[in-house]
Amino acid sequence: MRLISNSLRHLFAAALILPLVAVGAKAEETTPAQPSSEAQGFYATLGVGAAWPQNVTGDATVFGIPVNGSYNLNGGFAGEVGAGYDFGPVRTELTYSYTNATLSSLSVTALGINLGSTSINDGGVNTNSVLASAYVDIPTQSRWVPYLGGGVGYTNVSWGSYSATAFGVTVSQAPGSQGVFGYQGKVGVSYLASKSTDLFVEATYQGTAGFTVDSVNYDPLSSWGARLGARYRF
């Protein structure tokens, strides 16, 4: 009787456990595969955010007198769109990026004498860049993938017209633009939302070579930025 009782007990336990094992196995078969940080192929990318340019200096000759100016700039919109190819741990991109900033004030020095600061009316600085970049994705065996990289290319700096008044004298700057060497660096982290979509947040640094607008020679323009975006894999 004891042997029969033990056998019934074992059969009862098996009857409870086997369905649970079967359900678990079925769930494992139907669970989709996790997105891989080593996915390869073409993708499109889009990022939007803001950029905060550093102050930029310029110099010109006015009535034979060398004049230096330090321009304070306020941050503005920044965006980037393009296409890339993912080789696995390394990605390459060709992108178009745009940044916008406004001129807030100007400090003027002439003949070594600081003439003070004045506000600027209706001034703006835009950059339009085409950059070729490369990035390294750092594998983490998770959906979160840090990355870093940078690129070089062409930047068109567009300096809008503005006017500034100091000591009762109003000076106007004509608009202009110039194409120069441009570059950028990035550090960020991606979230693998699905096999075809990555979401990312990144910090950026963009810079240019020096440029000349309306006879004013400007030093290189640089800015820090932050963007949110997404990549879609084809």
Image: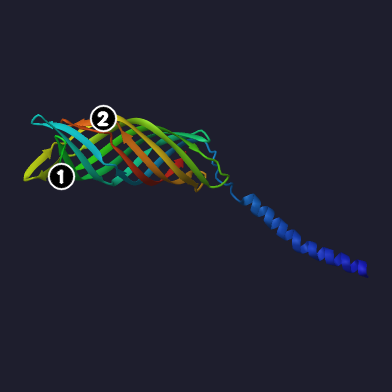
Residue occupying the point 28% across, 29% down: 180
Task: Choose between 133 and 166: the one closer to the eye.
Answer: 166
Where 112 falls versus 197 (above or below)? above
Crowdedness of circle 2 by 10 Å Cα count: few (<14), some, many (20+)?
some
* Residue marked by disc 1: 116
Give residue 18's quadrant in the image.
Answer: bottom right
Q: How many marks?
A: 2
Crowdedness of circle 1 by 10 Å Cα count: few (<14), some, many (20+)?
few
User: Can see residue 63?
Assistant: yes
Residue ranking furthest to the left = 168
Q: Are marks 1 and 2 in contact (CB under 8 Å)?
A: no
Q: Hey, what amino acid is under mark 1?
A: Gly
Question: Relative to 166, is 185 on the left or the right?
Answer: right
Measuring from the top left, give residue 171's x and y in whole percent: 10, 40
Residue occupying the point 54% across, 41% down: 37
Give residue 164's quadrant in the image.
Answer: top left
Q: Hey, what amino acid is under mark 2?
A: Gly
Measuring from the top left, give residue 69's x and y in whole percent: 18, 38
Helix, strand or loop under label 2: strand
Task: Choose between 176 and 19: the one closer to the eye.
Answer: 176
